[in-house]
Amino acid sequence: MQCNDPKCPQHGHLKVRGNVLTGTVKSAKAPKTVSVERILVKYVPKYERYKKTKSRVYAHNPDCIAAKEGDVVIIGETRKLSKTKCFVVLKIEKRAFEETMVSERQSEGAKEPEKQEKRHAVHEEKPRVEKKHSEKGKDAKHKKVKK
Ligand SMILES: [Zn+2]
């Protein structure tokens, strides 16, 4: 897929140099921009333990890549592209929308029959309770007979 974006590393005139990072896309709402979150582990000397920290980096998202929320992406450092962006999305490692689509389908398909089953179960439970009472009564009678 081609794109006319001059800030595209493949189809434009953009040099990628410096850091190459991986992270998950947390927001893709701004045009041609994604916010990529990375979870880092930092050592705390006072407690001699590690703590998790988060870092968010804004990256340019060319039309030919079009990363979406939840995707795991590789971003590369470039020149300053705007006030907040100095990274470009190079590649999508793992797409998120396939998993979410499947889970949505399953939840939509499963919700309706579950409700119906529950309703039926509620109706069926009433006679069962009566049976249990009668059984208990029988048991009690048996016990009384045995005693
Ligand atoms: Zn492109």
Image (cartoon, rainbow, N blue to C red):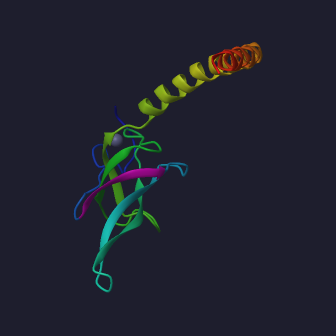
Considering depth in this image, is 55 or 145 the residue closer to the camera? 145
Give me the residue at 52% from left, 49% from top: 31
- The residue most toward the front is 147
Give me the residue at 30% from left, 62% from top: 78
Q: Is residue 6 above or below residue 107?
A: below
Q: Is residue 18 above or below residue 135?
A: below
User: Horizontal and vertical percent for residue 70?
Assistant: 44, 44
Considering depth in this image, is 142 or 61 the residue closer to the camera? 142
User: Horizontal and vertical percent for residue 63?
Assistant: 42, 41
User: Horizontal and vertical percent for residue 93?
Assistant: 29, 42
- The residue most toward the bottom is 46
Give me the residue at 36% from left, 61% from top: 39
Give me the residue at 33% from left, 39% from top: 94
Taking the image as four quarters, which one is ligand 1 found in? top left
Residue 96, image quadrant: top left
Left or right of 68 in this view: 20: left
Magenta extent: 19-26
Characterize the magenta stretch by its predominant secondary structure.
Answer: strand
